[in-house]
Image (tube, grey):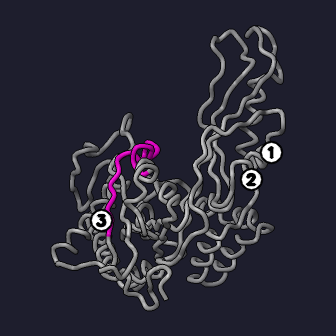
Amino acid sequence: QGEAPPLLFYGHVDVAPTQNQTWTHPPFEGVVDGGWVWGRGALDMKGGVAMMMAALLRMKAENRIPRGDVILAVVSDEEAGGRMGARFLVDEHPGLFSGVRWAVGEFGGFSLPLAGRRFYPIMIAEKQRCWLKAVVTGPGGHGSQIHRGGTMARVGRMLKTLDRARLPIHVTPAVRLVIEGLAANLGFPKKWLLKGLLHPHWADRILGWLGEKSRVFEPMLRHTVNATVIRGGQATNVIPSRVELELDGRLLPGFAPYDLLRELKDIIGPEIDLEVLAYEPGPGEPDMGLFETLAGVMNDLDPDGRPVPLLMTGVSDARFFAQLGIQTYGFLPMNLPDDFRFIETIHAADERVPAEAVAFGAEALYRLLVRYGSEPGFSLPNTP
């Protein structure tokens, strides 16, 4: 109808590998058993693409004309880095997305029980991929001799330091929205504890008090680095003089690789060389212009649930569309059982999703399309 900017729906239909995993049902048969859809991609993210398709087909079947154009982009290599999918579209065909301000993609909208309440985290921002290489050198020699403090010992010390050390706390605009959104729906003392995470002086102590629950919040508050690949040594009887380690670094929004390099040097020392292997800048400060519309959809579907912002600690194709000024919201709503371990099931054996959760998400996206552009005060960009 030309009353709202174009809205982008996008998702990927490639999936993570299944080798060396033991499945209850074959991973590519899409078996429905016990009310669940079993198979690789059920969560990540063929289920989400099915929701989008169902919502769009329903709009067409009911002859509903959306207030703004709706663009569907289905890509096939997000799990492999996005080079031939979202990145190709952004680099080679940016005109396809002219005028788009907001997009719906992965990951968010799933139900999350916390402190006796049910939340629906909606992704508004994500961390940035920053892969590093560390080079550790030292005296080599014959494996029959004593080599204390050599290259391997230095590697061991570095890995132990990475395991024990904590990089500094950073309170970004995105994590502030997350923490304040959660805290607003909790009582004392949980509200006080969560809001304490926004103060770097107290954050580390509070994370310690939270115990296992700190795993949800800690990656949102600091850069992370994990050693994933080690290369060194060619023969059992030769002490290597050079060992290379590949490090999976994830930067908070708004930071650059030199920030991470500086913080790492402070804890592992200057004698270990570091270099950036790959860096992909992510979205900047979130545009919250569509958040209330998405929250309204969730409030209608589940009045007892609480939609809140989410900072995703992984990366998605959102980083590519952000280069065109497009804000992605991770919004694939699913009403999941409270005991379902959502994050641990993605990319694992027996990936599955309740069939009714896919129907719930399809209904949510349909309501978004119907509602889009009708909110009070909504206007086209640069239009009073």
Q: Which residues are magenta?
A: 70-86
Which quadrant would residue 294 be assigned to in this image? bottom left
Q: Secondary structure at mark 3?
A: helix
The spot of residue 337 in percent (x, y) is 37, 67
Residue at mark 2: 167
Q: Quadrant of residue 33?
A: bottom left
As displayed, is residue 263 above or below residue 353? Answer: above
Q: Is residue 72 magenta?
A: yes
Q: Which comes before the other along the chain, label 2 or label 3? A: 3
Q: Residue at x 72, y 43 (%)?
A: 162
Question: Mark 1 packing: few (<14 Cα in 10 Å), some, or many (20+)?
Answer: some
Q: Tell me which amino acid carries mark 3.
A: Met
Q: Nearer the viewer, residue 374 or 162?
A: 374
Q: Residue at x 32, y 69 (%)?
A: 70
Most extreme residue toward the left is 61
Q: Marks 3 and 2: in contact by CB < 8 Å?
A: no
Q: Badge 1 is on which residue?
A: 267
Q: Please, what secondary structure does the residue beneath circle 1 have?
A: helix
Q: Position of residue 186 (x, y in %)?
A: 58, 82
Specify few, some or many for label 2: CA neighbours under 10 Å numbering under 14, 14-19, or 20 or more: some
Res 116 seen here: no
x then y, percent, for residue 196: 72, 74
Q: Label 3, on which residue? A: 52
Calculate the distance from the C-alpha at mark 3 to the C-alpha at mark 1: 46 Å
Q: Nearer the viewer, mark 3 or mark 1?
A: 3
Query: Residues at badges 2 and 1 in contact (C-beta under 8 Å)?
Result: yes
Decide which of 196, 134 is in the foreground and name it.
134
